[in-house]
Image (spheres, helix red, strand yellow):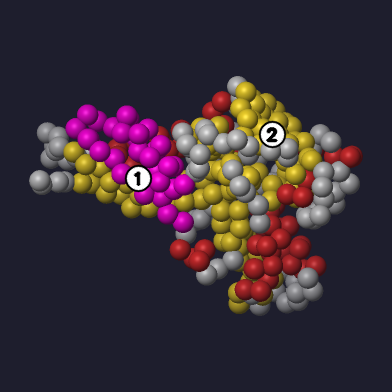
């Protein structure tokens, strides 16, 4: 049977956090591609590229981007309204739009794609009969240093204000104009699965005895984070060994600056620049001007 499709490749990036039943809180960033199948409209299109891209991106931004995504069937996850608890170390209370619940026991890429396909199809013209969403990781992650993290930007006007949203991204360390892969791997390892938080938002700070900017991997305590933002109140608990305290807002600009400080502490000399990504294609860099 003849079939006609419209495709958009890598038309956006999905940035979110996943609550994995085995690994806990994980930042994620994925390229998104789509195929639309259906009958041609009176203009000779399945759907015009411009409106198609805008509609699909708006739906993905609305239902999953910058949210915490949670499987519906998991013995270690308990939900009561907008309060979510995972094991003994993670809790999250936030406005409902900061959470997405996926039916099933795991958060595989096919499960995420199926959820997005249903949401996108409902928003498309009636002549579009089928939607296929493909999610894929950055290919350079197979060979280059990368790490996952979460953060919340309480002063942000958009969805970055949500406490447990996340990213997966490369990290670049440049010394005298050349990449230093050993330092990149060290920094990625140091920051794998961290949560960056402004020191003012940690409500039980005095009980934790943490050092600004330094991760305490052996810490066995629980950190509590709380703040109010334009979308509402956000509150969360997570293992303190995942926390990186920051003296300023945990923006990508300040993360890049902190990365350079940590690499300098490793004894690296020369002209140093750290390039920190917030997801896949955007980020910030910082150099201290020391030659």
Q: Residues within 10 Å of mark 2 (few under 14, many from 20)?
A: some
How far from the left and from the top, in percent, is residue 207? 89, 40
Residue 71 visible in rendering = yes
Q: How many callouts does the rendering have?
A: 2
Residue that label 2 marks: 91
In this rendering, would 242 be left or right of 51? right
Image height of 91 relative to 49, above or below: above
Closest to the observer: 163 or 269? 163
Quick one: quadrant of the C terminus? bottom right
In this rendering, would 41 be left or right of 256? left
> Which residue is pictured at 85% across the width and 49% down the height?
210
Q: Residues within 10 Å of mark 1 (few under 14, many from 20)?
A: many
Q: Residue furthest top?
A: 81
Region in magenta: 108-137
Image height of 203 relative to 17, above or below: above
> Which residue is pictured at 76% across the width and 63% down the height?
262
> Which residue is pictured at 47% across the width and 36% down the height?
104
Q: Nearer the viewer, mark 2 or mark 1?
A: 2
Q: Secondary structure at mark 2?
A: strand
């Amino acid at each position: 049977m003849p079939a006609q499709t419209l495709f958009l490749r890598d038309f956006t990036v999905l940035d979110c956090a996943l609550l994995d039943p085995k690994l806990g809180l994980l930042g994620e960033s994925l390229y998104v591609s789509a195929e639309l199948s259906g009958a041609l409209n009176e203009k000779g299109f399945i759907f015009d590229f411009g409106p198609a891209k805008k509609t699909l991106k708006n739906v993905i931004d609305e239902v999953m981007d910058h949210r915490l995504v949670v499987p519906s069937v998991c013995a270690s996850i308990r939900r009561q309204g907008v309060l979510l608890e995972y094991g003994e170390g993670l809790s999250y209370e936030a406005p409902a739009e900061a959470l997405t619940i996926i039916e099933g026991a795991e958060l595989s890429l096919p499960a995420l794609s199926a959820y997005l396909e249903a949401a996108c199809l409902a928003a498309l013209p009636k002549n579009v009969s089928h939607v296929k969403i493909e999610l894929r990781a950055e290919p350079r992650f197979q060979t280059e240093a990368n790490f996952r993290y979460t953060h919340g930007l309480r002063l942000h006007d958009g969805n970055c204000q949500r406490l447990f949203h996340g990213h997966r991204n490369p990290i670049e360390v440049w010394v005298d104009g050349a990449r230093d892969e050993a330092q990149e791997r060290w920094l990625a390892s140091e920051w794998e699965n961290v949560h960056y938080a402004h020191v003012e938002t940690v409500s039980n700070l005095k009980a934790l005895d943490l050092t600004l900017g330094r991760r305490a991997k052996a810490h066995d305590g629980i950190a509590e984070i709380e703040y109010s933002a334009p979308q509402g109140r956000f509150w969360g608990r997570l293992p303190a060994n995942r926390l990186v305290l920051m003296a300023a807002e945990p923006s990508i600009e300040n993360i890049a600056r902190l990365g350079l400080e940590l690499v300098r502490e490793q004894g690296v000399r020369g002209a140093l620049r750290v390039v920190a990504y917030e997801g896949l294609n955007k980020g910030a860099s910082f150099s201290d001007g020391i030659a």
